[in-house]
Image (tube, rainbow, N blue to C red):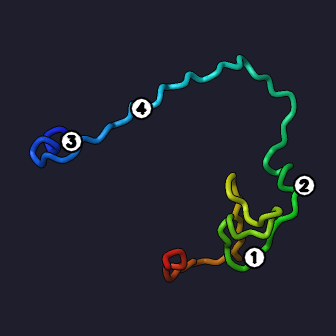
Amino acid sequence: MYEKFHKERNSPKILVPKPPEVEHTANYGVVKVHDYLSLNDLLNKIKPIVSEKPKHMELLDIGPNYGQHFGFILYRTSINKVKHLKIMGNYFLK
């Protein structure tokens, strides 16, 4: 498509670089797991961050530069037992 446009408009030719070569993945063989921590075991060993409203992971007060810029965050909440639950508004849409 570019070639057709180039010929019609008589625009300067652009050099299109070659795509990088595909690197093959390494094979490390079979990895045997000897010990592990379940998610509940891990959660019992760390201090939770409690907040009235959920915070983005980048805004959490953790680490030397504050915030967690990669990985996972577990958000949990609990609600009282009710017969009917009505969710109103678009809290997540701003």
Which numbered circle lies on residue 51?
A: 1
**Residue at position x 74%, y 69% in the image:** 60
Considering the numbered disc 4 on the image, is that residue within a helix, a strand or a loop?
Answer: loop
Considering the numbered disc 3 on the image, is that residue within a helix, a strand or a loop?
Answer: helix
Which numbered circle lies on residue 76?
A: none
**Residue at position x 21%, y 42% in the image:** 2
Q: CA distance from mark 1 to mark 2?
A: 19 Å
Q: Amino acid at mark 2?
A: Lys
Q: Amino acid at mark 3?
A: Tyr
Q: Are marks 2 and 4 in contact (CB under 8 Å)?
A: no
Q: Which mark lies nearer to you, 2 or 4? A: 4
Q: CA distance from mark 4 to mark 3?
A: 17 Å
Which numbered circle lies on residue 2?
A: 3
Residue placed under numbered mark 4 in the picture: 19
Q: Amino acid at mark 4?
A: Pro
Q: Are marks 3 and 2 in contact (CB under 8 Å)?
A: no
